[in-house]
Amino acid sequence: MKNTFKYSLLFGPLLFVISCQGILEENPPSSISISSFYKSESDALIGLYGAYSNIYDISGTSCLNYGDLNADDLVIPPLVSDLFSWDKFTYNSEVTINLWSSCFSGINKANEVIFYTEKIDFANKAAIISEAKALRAYYYFQLVQVMGGVPLYETPTIGFDAIYASRATADEIYNMIFRDLKDAVSKLNSKSNSGRINSDVANALLARIYLYKGDYQNALTFAKNVINLGRYDLFANYADIFKPSSNNGIEHIFQVQNLSGERNSSVPGFFGPRAPAGVYRTSFWALTDVPGYYAPSAQFIAENPTSYRRSVTIADKYEHIDGKTGTITMQQVYGGKFPYYISKFDDRKAELQSGENFSIIRYADILLIAAEAQNEVDPINIEKYTWINRIRQRARNGVSTDLPNLANLSQADFRTAVLEERRFELAFEGQRAWDLKRRGLFLQKLRAQGNTVQDYMLLFPIPDTQVKLNKNLVQNPGW
């Protein structure tokens, strides 16, 4: 995988430059056109790796801003004032510009792979095309859940006229997503290099997206496809999920690949405790300035039940990075204003060069999708308890009084229970806002927290610069 993304980082910018030259110049005499680049299977793979490179821009902190900071469990701590106020809903209509640009760049690269690979003759052609389509579907899912309908491109943009498309409906986008991911299920192998989409990943993404759409029968079908493979399991120790030494482990279905010193993860530093200026600033939690942009909300701290999982997820103290000096409490540093920090992603390197992968989807999520969908499709089927109780058993880590097994709940009570289980099991992994929105609870939860959030804010805005550039785009209401 390391080699895969070295290629992507090298050739992604190259392909963009080549593509731009093709648009801006007519038959440039001394440049390589994108069409003449694609001559062999290795060229198609290089193009595919370039399309994957955009996944870094929309994972990690971007995923957390949309999926968690915009919800009720994650906030910006008191020392931080240099981000969009995602947790206060005061962002403007340009807040989505990076997501828009990164996703459409990745979509166009994937479309180039699809279009030009079709013209090459080699044995593995269908699989590469199918993988590019699945990657395009993933980028489109990020866009449609954030902004609703967006322009739908299934071929690469060759000239300026082609880029000024109007918005497709959300249903049209989802139809394309489902079609392309099902194609990946049928045509891709079940195993691949880490960080690439295979048939297992496609099954898992379909389960998640169907759940988001409220199609519980299909969500259950595709979740059970993954479960029945028998290739995935839970780590015995919840903390191991988030250690770099466990990257691409038995629970990880799809992860964005990072490598310490080459492609560092920003997540541990963003969740680390941002100390005020003084003795703790660059010498205790790490030997560098810790961004500390995120903190657990008071509600999350108060409502997260006692368990081993809680102790891994948040902490009110930490040891000196040298392992000898001792422990400092958040109370000592902040005087009660910032009582806990999020510790589940701790990868405490002196210079914060973390190689911790970012999980897009893991097996625990699949078990909870199956449990929730089963409750909606066939509420008397007790298999739903098997799936959710596996998660709770691991979370209590042998302490019998914590998180007892669930049984004999009404359909409504189980619905509430599984949503809460997702809240704490998948905390700060980019899912909370989407869970609340699909269940119609987002506005209620955020207003109860004291936020001024308008009905139209269920969708984010189309970037205003794009609306001005493209007369065919219509802004989301309210923005």
Image: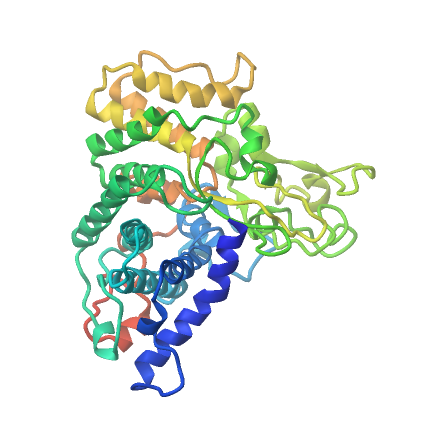
Q: Is residue 220 left or right of residue 275?
A: left
Screen quadrant of the C terminus: bottom left
Q: Nearer the viewer, residue 73 or 446?
A: 73
Q: Quadrant of residue 144?
A: bottom left
Judged from this view, the residue extending furthest toward the right is 325
Q: Is residue 407 above or below residue 369?
A: above
Q: For residue 382, which quarter of the picture?
A: top left
Left/right placement of residue 118 relative to residue 229 reads: left
Residue 444 in sight: no
Relative image position of residue 80 (x, y in whole percent): 58, 56
Q: Nearer the viewer, residue 172 or 153?
A: 153
Observer-nearest of 144 and 119? 119
**Does 35 sit above or below residue 72?**
below
Image quadrant in which you'd find residue 37: bottom left
Residue in the image at 37% along x and 27% along y: 367
Position of residue 437 measured from the top left corner of the image (x, y, whole percent): 30, 43
Q: Is residue 138 left or right of residue 170?
A: right
User: How far across and how far down the image is residue 112, in percent?
Assistant: 30, 65
Residue in front for this viewpoint, 76 or 368: 368
Relative to 409, residue 162 above or below: below
Q: Is residue 34 visible?
A: yes
Q: Is residue 309 above or below residue 271?
A: above
Colour scheme used in the picture?
rainbow
Residue at image point 39% right, 29% down? 420
Q: Residue 245: horizontal and vertical position, in percent?
A: 61, 37
